[in-house]
Image (cartoon, rainbow, N blue to C red):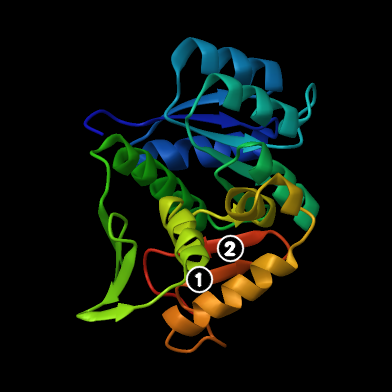
Amino acid sequence: MNRASRILLVDDEVVIQRALAPLLRSHGYEVEVAGTGREALSAVAARSPDLIVLDLGLPDLDGAEVCRRIRLESKAPIVVLSARGGEADKVAALDIGADDYVTKPFGSEELLARIRVALRRVEDAAGPEVERMAVADLVIDYNRRRVLRGDEEIRLTPKEFELLALLAHNLDRVVTHRTILKTIWGGNAVEQPEHIWVLMAQLRKKIEPDPGNPRYLLSEPFVGYRLVSTLEST
């Protein structure tokens, strides 16, 4: 973006506000602070932030409900910032519409990286429709439904390609098990996670140099999977 990205920081802890607002401003972002869910909803409606950092433990409204209401009005990325570290809380926030989830206590560099990734994803989505995508040393050809590593084609089944394409469209973002099941197998399959386990194992065998130590297709235990844009180790 040419102008500074506008970030709405929603947290009722004064210590967090005093630490994060100056940090974000020092990295070139415009920052507005809201201490309650109602203030956050008013700010979203009035000023259309480019990204929202949202604490779940708000004094007036449950943060998950605030997330749900924001998503009805805005497509801006939501990075949840919360002391609730349980898998159920993460899944609920991501299913409601959050783009990422950072658990307190957290490192400032981690949060800044998550924000950069979320904003970059918005910029990429605003560009022309992508026919081919490069992820590390893989190339995903959507039109031909092919995956290449260099000049070598990696042959995938239709469902394997659907899973890889779904993760690629949400690059660097956790896609929950429920979302994967609904997208690939339909709503009746949401209580059958074994479908994902089998399909992911098959896809990793074809994509990963070492399927037992995946570098592309990373797990968020009990939550979902993430396709990363740069190679990592688990």
Q: Secondary structure at mark 1?
A: strand
Q: Is residue 211 visible?
A: yes
Label 1 Cα neighbours within 10 Å, binned few <14 / some 14-19 / many ≥20: many
Amino acid type of the residue that numbered disc 2 sits on in the rendered structure: Tyr
Nearest the camera: 226 or 185? 185
Numbered label attached to residue 217: 1
Provide the residue designation for mark 2: 225
Residue drawn at point x = 71 percent, y = 50 percent? 90
Left or right, residue 198 beside residue 151: right
Q: Is residue 57 left or right of residue 115?
A: right
Q: Looking at the figure, which quarter contains the C terminus?
A: bottom right
Residue 42: where, in percent of width, then height? 59, 12
**Quarter the N terminus occupies:** top left
* Residue visible at 55% across and 31% down in the picture: 9
User: Pointers 1 and 2 in contact (CB under 8 A)?
Assistant: yes
Q: Residues within 10 Å of mark 2 (few under 14, many from 20)?
A: many
Sequence-earlier tag: 1 or 2: 1
What percent of the width, then of the height, locates residue 120?
A: 34, 45
The mark found on residue 17 in the picture is: none
Q: Residue at x 58, y 63 (%)?
A: 225
Q: CA distance from mark 1 to mark 2?
A: 7 Å
- Secondary structure under the numbered disc 2 in the rendered image: strand
* Left-right relation of 217 to 72: left
In the picture shown, does residue 107 fall above or below 62? below
Q: Residue at (76%, 57%) from the top-left corner?
A: 87
Query: x and y percent of residue 219 in the render?
Result: 61, 69
Please state which of residues 128 and 4 is positioned toward the viewer in this rendering.
128
Residue 196 x, y percent position in the rendering: 65, 66
Q: Amino acid at mark 1?
A: Leu
